[in-house]
Image: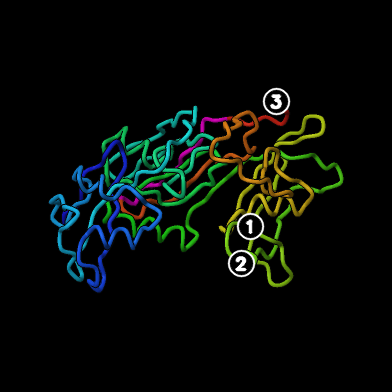
Amino acid sequence: MFEPPLRDGVAASRVGVGDGRFPTVLAFLGARFPAVADWPARLARGDVLDADGRPLSADAPCAAGSLLWYWRDPPPEPHVPFDIALLHQDEHLVVVDKPHFLPVIPSGRHLRETVLVRLRRQLGSATLAPIHRLDRETAGVLVFSVRPQDRGAYHALLRERDVHKIYEAVAPYRADLALPLIARHRLEKPDGAGFMQVQVAAGEPNAETLIELIEHAGPNARYRLTPRTGRTHQLRVQMNALGLPLLGDRIYPTLWPEPAPDTPPDWSHPLQLLAREIAFTDPVTGQPRRFKSRRTLTADPPR
C-alpha cells in the first residue's frame, strides 16, 4: 500500500471516509475535523492525497470506504534545547539516550519536538517505532525497532516481561527506611476523563519494584529502581507512597497545573528519574542485548 514520504521527519496521517454520506472531500474533512479551519488551503496546496498518493481537490468526490492521507499542522512548539544521543544502530534496532522534557511520540500539541520525529528526520527512516515508552519528563535508554516485521517479536518481550530494566532516581533520604526492599502496591487509574494521578489502592498488588540505595548526600539520596512490572507511573507512585517523592516531579505528590501554551518552558528542574539500563535476548537475532545510558544524576542536584 502507498504511504507518503516523511515531511521534515513527520509521517502523514490517514483517515478512512466511512459511509460516504459526504459529497466532497472538503465536506468530509470539515465534518470529521471541525477544529481545523484551513482545509481549503491545504487542499489547494496539494496536502491531502488519495490512497494512491494523488492530490485531491476540495470538490473531489468522497466515495464510501476511500482512504485519505494528510499531514498534521499543529501550532509552533517550543524547541526542547537538549540533544538525543545515539547509543546503537543496526538493521534491527536504534537505541538512543533520551533527554528530559522530550516526548517519545507525537501527541496533542507535541509533534516535531518528539524523539520519534527528530530521529526519523536525522536518520531518514520512516519505519522507526519505539518498542517501549518513557514519560516526557524521564531521561535515559529508549529502544526503537527499524523493520515493521520485527515489531511484534520485540513487543512480545514486554508482554512476557522478558526485558530487564534498571532506573536511577533522586529523592529524599530516609534513615529509618531499611533498604533494599521490594515495594508492592496496587496501582489504579481513577475514573473520569482527562489526565489524573495514578493512585495506590487497596487490594492485590499489581506493581512490584526492587528499591536499593546507591548513595546519599545531605537530605537527598540516589536510588536504584528495578521494576518487575510495568504499570503507568509505577516508579513515581511507589516512591511517593514510601515518602520518597522524586525531585522535580510535577505530578506526585502534588499535581502541578499544565502551563499555558504561550508560557516559556522552565528547563531548570528536570524530573530526577533516569532509565539507566535495558537488557534482553534479541528475539530476531538471538543475541544478548544490553544498553546503558551515559547520562548522570546526582544525589545533590542544583536547586
Q: Is residue 179 left or right of residue 73?
A: right
Q: Magenta region: which residues? A: 285-295
Vertical placement of residue 175 versus 29, above or below: above
> Is there a contact, CB below 8 Å, between mark 3 and mark 2?
no
Q: In the figure, is residue 267 to the left or right of 176? A: left
| Crowd around label 1: few <14 · some 14–19 · many ≥20 (10 Å) | few
**Left or right of 285 on screen, residue 293:** right
Location of residue 68 with respect to 113 vertically, above or below: below
Q: Earlier in the sequence, mark 1 or mark 3?
A: 1
Label tally: 3
Residue type at mark 1 is Met
- Residue at 78% from the left image edge and 39% from the top image edge: 172
Q: Which residue is mark 1?
A: 196
Q: Assess whether mark 2 and mark 1 are in contact (beta carbons under 8 angstroms).
A: yes
- Residue 85 location (% of width, % of height): 43, 30
Residue ID for mark 3: 302
Residue 63: x and y in percent read 17, 68
